[in-house]
Image (cartoon, helix red, strand yellow):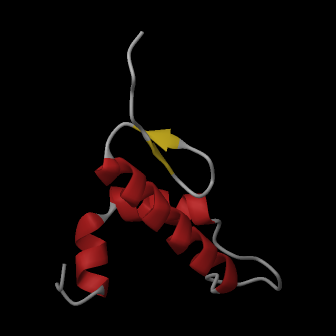
Amino acid sequence: MEKISVYKTNDGKTFEKEKDAINHENFIKVQKWYDQNKLYGNYAGSYVDFKDLIEWIQENPSEVRTILGHKL
């Protein structure tokens, strides 16, 4: 038998590396923030889904840098 150590985040997920657990916790914080600060669309009640926003950010890093004024 072998003793193992893992990092458990507030939502119950486990990670072998502390860095991965911290990244996951930070992602959850951003998601919770976005739930209160959504980007709304052109139609009443429509908004950009969080998963779509994250996908766009990952696919367009140069656009993100431009939007943020090259401060990344």
Would you place residue 46 above or below residue 8 in this image?
below
Q: Position of residue 37 (x, y in %)?
A: 63, 86
Q: Position of residue 68 (x, y in %)?
A: 28, 87
Q: How many marks?
A: 0
Residue 41 visible in rendering:
no
Would you place residue 46 above or below residue 7 in this image?
below
Q: Position of residue 7 (x, y in %)?
A: 43, 45
Would you place residue 41 above or below residue 26 in this image?
below
Residue 3 visible in rendering:
yes
For residue 69, what is the image quadrant?
A: bottom left
Q: Residue at x 31, y 75 (%)?
A: 64
Q: Position of residue 27 (x, y in %)?
A: 47, 63
Q: Residue at x 52, y 53 (%)?
A: 9
> Which of the two residues, 2 or 15, is positioned nearer the viewer here?
2
On the picture, is 16 further left or further right than 36? left
On the picture, is 72 further left or further right than 61? left
On the picture, is 41 further left or further right than 45? left
